[in-house]
Image (tube, rainbow, N blue to C red):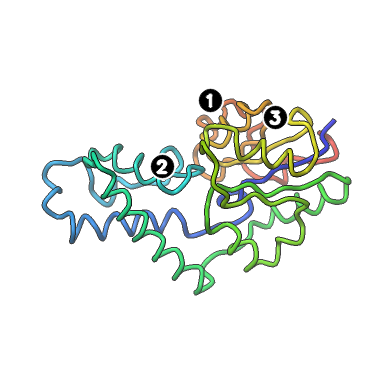
Amino acid sequence: MVDAFIFDVDGVIVDSPHERAWGEALRDLMAVEWRNLRAAVRYSPELYTSDVYRLYVAGRPRADGAAALLAYFGIDDPHGARAALLCERKQRLIERLIERGEFRAYDDALRFLAAAKHCGAKLAAASSSKNANALLAGLDLLRLFDANVCGRDFAHGKPHPDIFLAAAEALGVEPDRCVVIEDAPNGVAAAKAGGMRCIGVARGEDAELLASAGADWVVGTLDDVDPADL
């Protein structure tokens, strides 16, 4: 029996501008501040794709995502200064996009949230993003959750299970009675490492990645899952 559902936010509940902000921040840095690196790295704007974002950035704490993105493109950063600048530039961009309201809730996620609430399940929001609370507040969704650990600092980010275990503890529910809803392989891995079942939401062409990470169910839309049946 499932007593609780734990939701990632970006890509699960909210169609957010995170992917766009990371791409634009890196593109601008490579065009100006880091233009002398272009001949020595594997980067070009068209190589930053949704798959790259989901594999190397989505679900990770901001600094970890920046470091992984730079490493993927072969951009040397032995002291972390470039990752820090990328984080700073990305955050400026995401804040502007959020202020302009350039995000929306996924309709299937809203229906799933309502159905889960109707079943009597407890709900938690658990995103590594420091911006997740602003997105949920902007959509008036924070009130739906019984616990919220979004944006908190943990000793280990996803794919470690710390954030999901904290959400389960805040709900007062044992991990094996929780189901995590995720859209990123790192998030799926974190859920499984915490002893939880996981629904992988493949909003792009990443169903195989989510399945390979260990998702118990992989769906293209949350309309394919009835919380009452779990």
Please give left or right for residue 39 compared with residue 81 in the image. Answer: left
Three-letter residue code for mark 2: Asp
Instruction: From the image, state whether disc 3 or disc 2 is nearer to you.
Output: 2
Rendering coords of residue 118 (x, y %): 87, 51
Q: Are marks 2 and 1 in contact (CB under 8 Å)?
A: no
Quote the CA–CA distance across marks 3 and 2: 25 Å
The quarter of the rendered structure image containing the C terminus is top right
Please give the name of the residue rendered at 57% of the width and 42% of the height, measured from the top-left corner. 183
For the point 60% across and 36% down, the residue is 162
Q: Residues within 10 Å of mark 2 (few under 14, many from 20)?
A: some
Residue type indicated by callout 1 = Ser
Horizontal relation, residue 142 to residue 56: left or right: right
Would you name the residue on which mark 1 appears? 212
Question: In the image, 161: left or right of 68?
Answer: right
Which residue occupies 72% across, 47% down?
124
Of badges 1 and 3, the one in the foreground is: 3
- Percent coordinates x, y for residue 1 in the rendering: 85, 30
Q: Secondary structure at mark 1?
A: helix
- Residue type marked 3: Arg
Q: Which disc number belongs to residue 64? A: 2
* 197 w.r.t. 81: above or below: above
Secondary structure under tag 3 reads strand
Query: Which numbered tag is attached to residue 160?
Result: none
State the SS at label 2: helix
Real-space CA distance between mark 1 and mark 3, rounded to the nearest whole angstrom: 14 Å
Sequence-first tag of 3 and 2: 2
Residue 197 circle label: 3
Depth check: give the residue in front, 146 or 204: 146
Would residue 91 appear left or right of 187 to someone viewing this image? Answer: left
Query: Is tag 2's residue or tag 1's residue first in the polypeptide sequence?
Result: 2
Location of residue 133 in the rendering, given as x and y in whole percent from the top left corner: 61, 60
Could you tell me if the residues under marks 3 and 2 are in contact, i.e. CB atoms within 8 Å?
no
